[in-house]
Image (cartoon, rainbow, N blue to C red):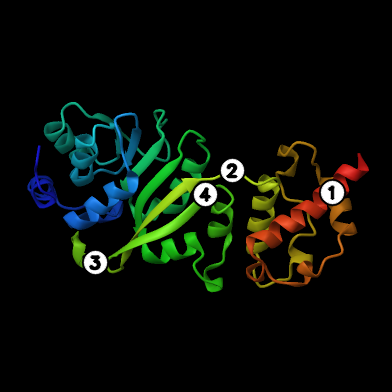
Amino acid sequence: MGRTARELIDGLRSVQANDKSLGQHFLHDEGVLNRTMELAQLSKSDKVLEVGPGPGVLTEKIINSGAELFAVEIDEGACEHLRSNFPKMNLIQGDVLKVDWPEVNKVVANIPYQISSPLIDKITRIPAIKTVVILVQEEFAQRLVVETVADRGSLGLCTALDWKSVMDRRVGSHCFIPAPKVNSRLIMMERIEIPEGAKLAKMLIRQGFGQRRKKLRNTLAKAPKRINRINGWHSSAYRAAFESLDSSLLERRPEELDLADWLELVKRLTDFVQAMG
């Protein structure tokens, strides 16, 4: 072991060029890689999923930590490179959004930016995963963490129902080969206890932001399409609860509500339905 990021990147690029369609911008900055590992706090008891390892710059550090590593890589050439350099690693070739994942408790990765949102959605649906450390596009990071009111959207608000997310180091384009046109940001996510009513809150948030220029009294009047998947709810019960709701929050647009406001709406709706019996 002991190979540098640049050596691993040069090894892969000597046999094939970067595939732009896969978002292949390889991180070569050792400081950022070391910071990723500091945030991940890996131990021998951890089972880690790495998404899109590419040349293996992060792979090497995860293996050296003693944690059990599983990696999913879609690019055939990169898989051959990884098998050659890390013959004992657990490598799955395929689309990380489609393949079945092994049982892991952490995700540590420099992910392809075009799959950021669906990847987080898939991670969230696997309760065993407790910690996530990923490198994402900075604009995406800001929306995920909801650093300001201007960043409010369905992504950040829904994510906040399952995770405590914080932004860490900013990573400039010069830290990649080839350099992308955007800056990046390390994100750390730790799973939290899900608040009561989270499922309905997610449905309402997504429905509200689907027409974000309209007031919530208009966009939330119709029951969410899959509300019957929530125990105790169905369309007619929702409509009755909504019609009974007297709240100034409904006169606002979705970006004007913080997470506590959304949960308050859910509580009032739920209280009405429970009172109906």
Check disc 4: other Cα within 10 Å, few if <14, some if 14-19, many if 20+.
many
Q: CA distance from mark 2 to mark 3?
A: 36 Å
Q: Are marks 4 and 3 in contact (CB under 8 Å)?
A: no
Tell me the quadrant of the picture where the C terminus can be found: top right
Amino acid at circle 2: Glu
User: For the view shown, which residue lies furthest in the top direction?
Assistant: 88
Nearest to N terminus: mark 3 or mark 1: 3
Q: Earlier in the sequence, mark 4 or mark 3?
A: 4
Q: Quadrant of the N terminus?
A: top left
- Of mark 2 and mark 3, the one earlier in the sequence is 3
Circle nearer the viewer, 2 or 3 = 2
The residue wearing badge 3 is: 173
* Mark 1 residue type: Asp
Q: Which residue is mark 1?
A: 271
Expressed as whole percent of the image width and height from the top left, the position of residue 264 reads 74, 57
Residue with the mark numbered 4: 163
Q: Quadrant of residue 29?
A: bottom left
Q: Considering the numbered disc 2 on the image, is that residue within a helix, a strand or a loop?
A: loop
Residue 17 placement (x, y as % from top left): 15, 52
Of labels 1 and 2, the one closer to you: 2
Mark 1: give few (<14), some (14-19) or many (20+) Cα within 10 Å. Answer: few
Tell me, yes or no, if residue 203 can be seen here: yes
Query: What whole-number distance in Å separates the C-alpha atoms at marks 4 and 3?
Result: 27 Å
Q: Label 2: which residue?
A: 193
